Amino acid sequence: MLSNLTSDDWCTLVMCTVYEGAIQMRVGLVSKDAAKVHLKSLSDQDRYTRFCTNIKDDQIDKYVDSAKGVFYGVFCVGDNWVDRCVCLMHFVPDHKSKEAEIALSTLPDYRGNGYAKKLLTGGIFMANAYLMEKVVMSGLSSNKAIVVLAKSCGLEVEHECGEFMGERGTAVSLFNTLAENNIKMFKILCWNS
């Protein structure tokens, strides 16, 4: 089951097969072609919710072709769509800012099954593996489901001008803070003795 995947699984995951009831699901890397098919399957309203703007098929092609980072997804195998990505995560680590940006989308028939939460949780684990200090997400404040999802995964969410920004520190940022505090304490102790 998807809920049994650990952080180690996410850091090295290429493709695995899991079972959700009678439906066989695969989780893993998504090709750019499969990402395009998934994003083009979204309704106009879902595209607006995902991209915060109206986006057409040719713009989706340009977005995916020029995308940095990596796409991960959940594939449904049991309904004659062998390569149908039903939930997509775009994970973009930025080594200069030490932030990883995550964007998610799920096809309507597959919402409410926890797939986006599992991908977001996996993205947070991947951010640790990439030594990122922060995970960020943004979107429309009216997208209540993604706001609730971000909060449930520990992101602090702020709203401004109809959009939200969610962010969360990673274990790497916690480790760096602890190391900095220990160095400060060591210097204080050395100077005061």
Image (spheres, rainbow, N blue to C red):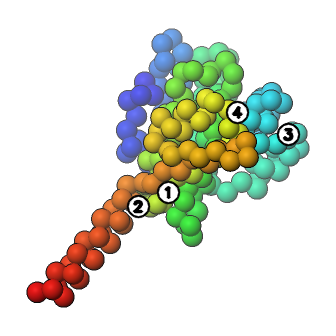
Q: Dividing the image into 4 quarters, which one contains the C terminus?
A: bottom left
Q: Badges 2 and 1: C-beta atoms under 8 Å apart?
A: yes
Mark 3 element type: loop
Labels 4 and 1: the sequence-earlier one? 1
Amino acid type shown at disc 2: Ser
Q: Which residue is mark 4?
A: 142
- Residue 126 percent across, percent down from the top left: 47, 50
On residue 134, the disc is 1
Label 2 vs 1, first from the N-terminus? 1
Foreground residue among 187 and 117: 187
| Three-letter amino acid code of the residue under disc 3 | Asn
Which residue in the structure is indicated by mark 2? 173
96 over 74 or under it: above or below = below
The residue indicated by pointer 3 is 54
Q: Residue furthest top?
A: 22
**Contact? badges 4 and 1 (CB < 8 Å):** no
Give the CA separation, mark 4 to mark 1.
24 Å
**Image disc number at residue 79:** none
